[in-house]
Structures are given as structure tokens and as C-alpha cells.
Image (cartoon, helix red, strand yellow):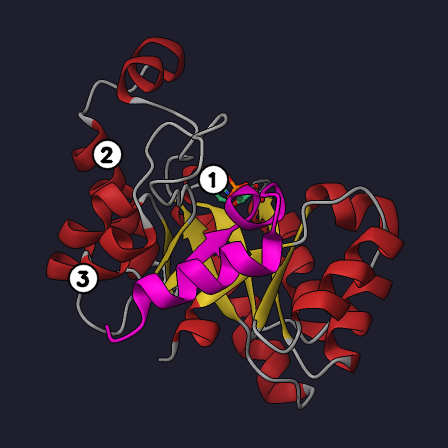
Amino acid sequence: MSPDQRIILALDVPGFDDAVEIIDRFHEHVEIFKVGSELFTASGPGIIEKVHAYGKKVFLDLKFHDIPTTVYKSALAAARLGVFMFNVHTLGGSAMMQQAAEAVRKVSLKENVNRPKVIGVTILTSMDQERMQSEMGISLRMSAQVKHLASMAQRAGLDGVVASAEEAEEIRARFGRDFLIVTPGIRPVWAVADDQKRTLTPREAIKKGADYLVIGRAVLSQPDPPGALKRIEDEIAGF
Ligand code: C5P
């Protein structure tokens, strides 16, 4: 994949007009835009249609985490929006993930929509091991916990996981070439970490096996956002 196909630009803005401004500015250099809970809550599915109108793909990052029936219905709704990819929390459990996978399989067979990729969020990149253990009561080490959740996701029929680039290498080695790895928490050496804890540079993430890099502030909070995107694309070119 070329760099512009690997980068998922996060539309982390409050409303429809702000998002359109970004899509308009970057659509020639980015293939996939991420619509998260802030933007989707504010603007609804109209923003997804807008990305599609530019001929681009959507990663719908709503991180479903609910009872299996509710996630099944949410997954149907996401698939019907024609998104390229959406995600669920692996911590919602195997039955919930199976229902998400089943929903997209069914809707794509019966309703002639493209089957979206369903990705499981493992442990958020804003969480470090100490807080995961003390607050969530999980006693495993971070890398073991992420592998455990990735294994559940694979067995439940998901297409891959969202994980920190720090864990990408082990996930790639264990779960094979076809299991997608989407990594947020990407910070080039010239960008600040913000609230992210488990960060790696774009080049490190790709070297460790990430398929897609989710990038928000490392581009959009820079003084020269198009220049920042270009630097990142140059950094991962050739891998
Ligand atoms: O600005 P930054 O590049 O840190 O943004 C990362 C984006 O990826 C945010 O929109 C955040 O919601 C999302 N994300 C994340 N960790 C996950 C899944 C998604 O940071 N596990």
C-alpha cells in the first residue's frame, strides 16, 4: 500500500462544516477519513455521505460496546451506511463480537452492500499498564492482555484490531498477515504526545507491522497541517 492509502486522517472536529473543510483540504492526499463519536454525535450520517461524495472511504470509529443484540443492530446500521470499516470494543466479549461479524456478513449478502471490515479495539492507547491494572483490575501485562483480546477478536470472526504500535509486532507474528492492525497513538519525533501514552513514530509503526495509521493531532494541530502530512507520508514511503 502507498502512504496515502495507509493513513487514516481523524476528523476530530466539532461539526459538519469543520469536517468538510478538512476533507476538502486533504482529499487528494488521503484515502480514508475517520469519523469518531464527537463528529458523528454532532453531525449524524450526513458527514459519511459527504466523505463518500468525495470518492473517499470512512472508518466509523464509534467503538460499539453493548449487549450483543444492540451491537448486532448497530453493526447492521453501520454497514448500511456503506462505511469501509468500523469498530467494536473487544472488552464487550466474544458473543458481542460474533454478533457484529454476523451482522455485516448477513447484510452484505442480503442487501448488496459492501461488507465493511470490523475491527476490535483492544486497550486504548491513552491507557498505560499501571492504570489498566489498578483501575480496570486486569492483572496481565499490557502485551499479554492485548494479545488475549486480539485472539478473542480473531476467533469471533473480526477482521483485525486497533492496538498500539508497541504491540503490533507481536500481533502480526501471532495472528498472520491477513489480520488487520490499525494503530492510533502515532507521534512523529517532532509532535507532542498529548493524552496518548503508548505512542510510536509512523515509521516504527509500519516497521512493526501496522496496516493503517490513525493520525489526528500530529497533522491537524500542527502549524502547517498539509506539510505535516507530507512529512509523515515521506517517513513511511518505501515500506
Ligand atoms: O490526535 P490523535 O492522533 O492522538 O488521535 C487519535 C484518534 O484515534 C482519536 O480520534 C481517537 O479517538 C482514536 N483512537 C485512539 N485509540 C483507540 C482507537 C481510536 O486514540 N484505541
Q: Residue at x 28, y 47 (%)?
A: 165
Q: Amino acid at mark 1?
A: Gly
* Residue 215 lies in the magenta stretch: yes
Q: Which residues are magenta?
A: 213-239
Closer to the observer: label 2 or label 1? 2
Q: Residue at x 39, y 40 (%)?
A: 190
Towards the viewer: 94 or 58: 58
Q: Is residue 53 left or right of residue 152?
A: right
Q: Amino acid at mark 3?
A: Phe
- Residue 162: x percent and y percent? 40, 50
Towards the viewer: 19 or 126: 19
> Which residue is the site of mark 3?
175
The relative height of residue 148 versus residue 182 in the rendered view (above or below) is: above
> Which residue is the site of mark 2?
145
Q: Earlier in the sequence, mark 2 or mark 1?
A: 1
Q: Residues within 10 Å of mark 3 (few under 14, many from 20)?
A: some
Location of the N terminus by quadrant is bottom left
> Which residue is the site of mark 1?
92
* Tag 3 near tag 1, CB within 8 Å: no
Q: Work out whether residue 211 can be spotted.
A: no
Q: Work out whether residue 32 can be spotted.
A: yes
Q: Amino acid at mark 2?
A: Gln
Tell me the SS state at disc 2.
helix
